[in-house]
């Protein structure tokens, strides 16, 4: 029987900054034009967190029943590791999606942006389809595309729109930046799993690119967001706060390009998640000021 620690591991807490950071940036962009709302920001954060946990449990379930997680470098999964039944993990995924849907309905009701219900439904479908269904797009090398769209563009711009009913260009820059770091989070995870993913036919982008190019792809995904932060300086000089992350970006880049494997990449996975959170905080505050 799975313990609380097992369920927390299954929720993949390291990935949760990928959910909160876009909301912080989106709120900062709204504040930059004098339209921020703390209440709506908190609702948006709740939606994002619930969807992130839901997709993590959905991935645990789908990869587990496919046998993808039978051999892995990281911690054992709930389904693949036999810690919880597939049906229980699947229910946990849809319960998380349900929580996100309820919070999302409250948010769009307050903002009057009812069309976002369709966007939210699409996000749930995409969350399930990443590793679920007959043709999971995560197995086709399109995982980063989904992450970029839903945990970058949609999360950031949706947050700004529900508060300001406008999309300043800084929100777009921040959305692209945070989306790329979220992609870096997925990329380094898939670089770690390259040997086993290739064996079970999981054709992630890392598998398609190969080890070396995938590592360079990770580096680009970490550094381009810093450039985008600097480009926001004309709107708010405080956006240059993102330059505080340069030493951090140098460190994780060196580790990845140095050929780290296995558990050494788990540390990079954690640090990339924290880097995304720091990016969200610094750029969000910078845009707000």
Image (cartoon, helix red, strand yellow):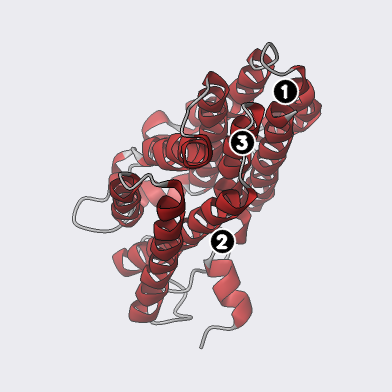
Q: Which residue is mark 2?
A: 12
Q: Reply above or below: 196 against 153.
A: below
Which of the 4 quarters of the picture holds residue 43?
Answer: bottom right
Mark nearest the camera among 2 and 3 is 3
Where residue 270 appears, as percent x and y from the top left, is 67, 50
* Residue 187 seen from this side: no
Q: Residue at x 33, y 64 (%)?
A: 62
Residue lying at 44% horizontally and 81% vertically, measured from the top left: 84
Q: Does label 2 or label 1 sit earlier along the sequence?
A: 2
Which residue corresponds to mark 1? Answer: 239
Q: Residue furthest bottom?
A: 1
Which part of the image, by quadrant, shows the C terminus?
top right
| Residue 245 position (above or below residue 233) | below
| Residue pointed to by mark 3 | 25
Disc 2 and disc 3: Cα gap in Å?
Answer: 22 Å
Residues 116 and 132: in front is: 116
Say which label, 2 or 3, has the lower sequence index. 2
Disc 1 to disc 3, C-alpha distance: 11 Å
Mark 2 vs mark 1, foreground winner is 1
Q: Position of residue 138 (x, y in %)?
A: 34, 46
Instruction: Decide which of 147, 23 is in the foreground and name it.
Output: 23
């Amino acid at each position: 029987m799975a313990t609380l620690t097992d369920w927390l591991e299954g929720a993949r807490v390291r990935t949760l900054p990928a959910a909160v950071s876009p909301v912080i940036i989106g709120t900062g962009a709204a504040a930059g034009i004098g339209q921020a709302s703390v209440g709506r920001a908190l609702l948006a954060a709740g939606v994002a967190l619930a969807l992130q946990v839901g997709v993590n449990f959905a991935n645990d379930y789908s990869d587990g029943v496919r046998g993808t997680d039978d051999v892995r470098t990281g911690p054992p999964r709930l389904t693949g590791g036999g810690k919880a039944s597939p049906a229980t993990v699947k229910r946990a995924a849809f319960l998380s999606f349900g929580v996100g849907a309820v919070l999302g309905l409250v948010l769009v009701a307050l903002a009057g942006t009812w069309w976002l219900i369709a966007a939210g439904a699409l996000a749930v479908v995409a969350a399930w389809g990443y590793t679920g269904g007959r043709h999971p797009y995560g197995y086709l090398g399109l995982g980063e595309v989904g992450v970029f769209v839903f945990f970058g563009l949609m999360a950031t711009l949706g947050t700004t729109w529900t508060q300001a009913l406008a999309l300043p260009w800084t929100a777009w820059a921040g959305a692209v930046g945070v989306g790329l770091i979220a992609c870096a989070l997925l990329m380094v995870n898939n670089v770690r799993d390259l040997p086993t993913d290739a064996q079970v036919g999981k054709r992630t982008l890392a598998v398609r690119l190969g080890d070396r190019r995938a590592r360079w792809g990770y580096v680009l995904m970490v550094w381009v967001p810093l450039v985008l932060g600097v480009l926001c300086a004309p709107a708010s000089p405080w956006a240059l706060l993102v330059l505080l992350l340069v030493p951090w970006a140098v460190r994780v880049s060196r580790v990845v390009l140095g050929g780290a494997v296995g558990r050494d990449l788990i540390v990079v996975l954690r640090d990339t998640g924290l880097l995304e959170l720091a990016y969200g905080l610094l750029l969000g505050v910078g845009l707000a000021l």
